[in-house]
Image (cartoon, grey):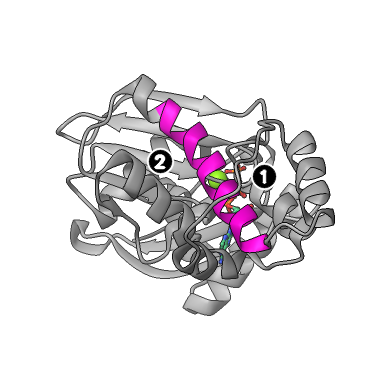
Amino acid sequence: MFTCGIDVGSVSAEAVILDKNENKNRICTYIISPTGGDSKEAALSVFNSALSKAGIAQEQIESVVATGYGRQNIPFADKNITEITCHAKGILYFFPQTRTVIDIGGQDSKVIKLDPDGNPLDFLMNDKCAAGTGRFLEVMSKALDINLENFAEIFKKTKDKVDISSTCTVFAESEIVSLIGHGVNKNKIIKGLVYSITNRIISMVERIGLEEPVCMTGGVAKNLAVVDALSEKLKVKIYVPSEPQITGALGAAILAG
Ligand SMILES: Nc1ncnc2c1ncn2[C@@H]1O[C@H](COP(=O)(O)OP(=O)(O)OP(=O)(O)O)[C@@H](O)[C@H]1O
Ligand SMILES: [Mg+2]
């Protein structure tokens, strides 16, 4: 039996098709694509692309579960489930022992605490402010004219940081533009920015209470500068799935059917 999970986020939409034969979950295929301005259209597009990539007809999919901020707006989904539940479920596929999940997406960040059996115990979510999210890094990457993909290498090779005093994304962007104007080394600014977003996440982790093993999901988990800074400050190893962006959709597919 096949199921499908769809995660429509603010930045990206994902579809995961799962083969549940013999009660074993096996990922058949997945698609990641920008959400764009129409979340309904994005959901349909990743669903159809996943079906054709897997060579599966829509009728063969037993159940579709939607998650993400656009989850209520997907007419072909049988059910929708919150991101907290889906991320918690999805991460256990990759790391069954997980006790803390840090999900940093485009518009929100969440820390989820799991009990020893993998059930969500508690969570904290920052969805009121762009600071501490992928959006913050995207804005700064544009202001600096340096690709997010290069942040990890720059973070690693740069020793000193420039402290960014503004916590608000808009003010931090102006601060950076002004620092660049004053000829401050861009690599040092990046180092400062990465610690700035990291500090936001750490305060959430501290409030909820750190339990190991700690795993990271969401697109920002692909930014190894943030993963390294979090790991350094929290003094723990942080596990990242081979494809961190599909965790929500994978959890939805596992919970389907
Ligand atoms: N290859 C990459 N390298 C560095 N950062 C990346 C990469 N791909 C994505 N990101 C980061 O991931 C963020 C998007 O994450 P994700 O796709 O999980 O968001 P989302 O699920 O759509 O958002 P939300 O859950 O907040 O609604 C981007 O803002 C960007 O900062
Ligand atoms: Mg998300």
The residue segment tinted magenta is 186-204
- Seen in the picture, residue 72 relative to 241 is either above or below; the reply is above
Q: Is mark 2 within 8 Å of ligand 1?
A: no
- Magenta region includes residue 13: no
- Characterize the local packing of mark 2: few (<14), some (14-19) or many (20 or more) Cα atoms within 10 angstroms: many
- Residue occupying image coordinates x 79% and y 56%: 180
Residue type highlighted by circle 2? Ile
- Residue occupying image coordinates x 50% and y 60%: 223
Residue 253 percent coordinates (x, y): 41, 51
Instruction: Report how far apart the C-alphas of labels 1 and 2 lie in the structure.
Output: 16 Å
- Ligand 1, seen in the image, is in the quarter at bottom right
* Mark 1 or mark 2: whose residue is earlier in sequence: 2
Q: Is mark 1 within 8 Å of ligand 1?
A: yes
- Characterize the local packing of mark 1: few (<14), some (14-19) or many (20 or more) Cα atoms within 10 angstroms: many
Instruction: Give the labeled residue for mark 1.
Output: 136
- Seen in the picture, residue 56 relative to 160 is either above or below; the reply is below
121, 80: nearer the viewer: 121
Residue 210 percent coordinates (x, y): 27, 30
Residue 11 percent coordinates (x, y): 67, 52
Residue type highlighted by circle 1? Phe
Q: Secondary structure at mark 1?
A: helix
Q: Is residue 62 visible?
A: no
Q: Is residue 171 visible?
A: yes
- Quarter of the rendering containing residue 113: top left
Instruction: Give the labeled residue for mark 2.
Output: 102
182, 99: nearer the viewer: 182
- Residue occupying image coordinates x 65% and y 51%: 137
- Quarter of the rendering containing residue 183: bottom right
- Magenta region includes residue 194: yes
Picture quarter with the N terminus? bottom left
